[in-house]
């Protein structure tokens, strides 16, 4: 005495049985679908009209942070450029003010990866470069 399945075309009892199984499975799976809401604290653009992107940032103190990235801009916030893309370092405060900025690199493309704060309140920039002139030896 077990369940008997008849796969003959037109057998509606098998189709109803499969439909019931699908309904039970769908009801057994908890539908815990929530939309995640993101609260944007602040949004600001730094750089110029070229291709600029941030790679890393560090918090210096409670009100200031340093952002490191690659910049191909020669205008707006970027005051100096050396080649096809430079390492661009900028310091901002929590009021969104650009406090200072500096470009590093040579005549070819330079990419920053990380910035690390040192124990003497300085920082070290790690990245790679295709340049062999300018700031790159």
Image (tube, rainbow, N blue to C red):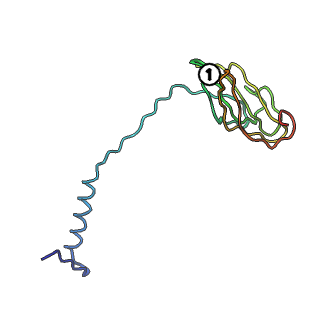
Q: Is residue 84 left or right of residue 68?
A: right
What residue is drawn where x is 24% and y is 71%? 15
In the current view of this chain or complex, which residue is farthest to the bottom? Answer: 8
* Residue 88 x %, y %: 73, 31
In the current view of this chain or complex, which residue is farthest to the front? Answer: 119
Q: What is the secondary structure assignment of the residue under circle 1?
A: loop
Pointer 1: residues within 10 angstroms few (<14), some, or many (20+)? some
What residue is drawn where x is 51% and y is 25%? 41
Q: Quadrant of residue 113?
A: top right
Please say if 94 is above or below 4. above
Q: Is residue 122 left or right of residue 23?
A: right
The C terminus, quarter of image: top right
The N terminus, quarter of image: bottom left
Q: Quadrant of residue 77?
A: top right
Q: Quadrant of residue 69?
A: top right
Most foreground residue, 71 or 62: 62
Please say if 5 is above or below 87. below
What residue is drawn where x is 67% and y is 23%? 91
* Residue 62 x %, y %: 56, 18
Q: Which residue is mark 1?
A: 60
What residue is drawn where x is 21% and y is 79%? 6
* Residue 82 x %, y %: 83, 34
Q: Is residue 132 left or right of residue 101?
A: right
């Amino acid at each position: 005495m077990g369940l008997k399945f008849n796969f003959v075309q037109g057998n509606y009892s098998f189709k109803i049985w499969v439909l019931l199984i699908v309904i039970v499975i769908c009801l057994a799976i908890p539908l815990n679908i929530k939309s995640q809401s993101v609260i944007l604290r602040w949004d600001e653009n730094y750089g110029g009209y070229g291709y600029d992107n941030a790679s890393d940032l560090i918090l210096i103190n409670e009100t200031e942070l340093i952002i490191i990235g690659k910049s191909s801009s020669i205008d707006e916030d970027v005051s100096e450029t050396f080649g096809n893309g430079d390492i661009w370092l900028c310091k901002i405060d929590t009021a969104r003010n650009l406090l200072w900025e500096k470009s590093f690199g040579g005549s070819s493309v330079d990419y920053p990866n990380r910035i690390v704060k040192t124990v003497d309140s300085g920082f070290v920039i790690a990245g790679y470069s295709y340049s062999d002139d300018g700031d790159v030896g």
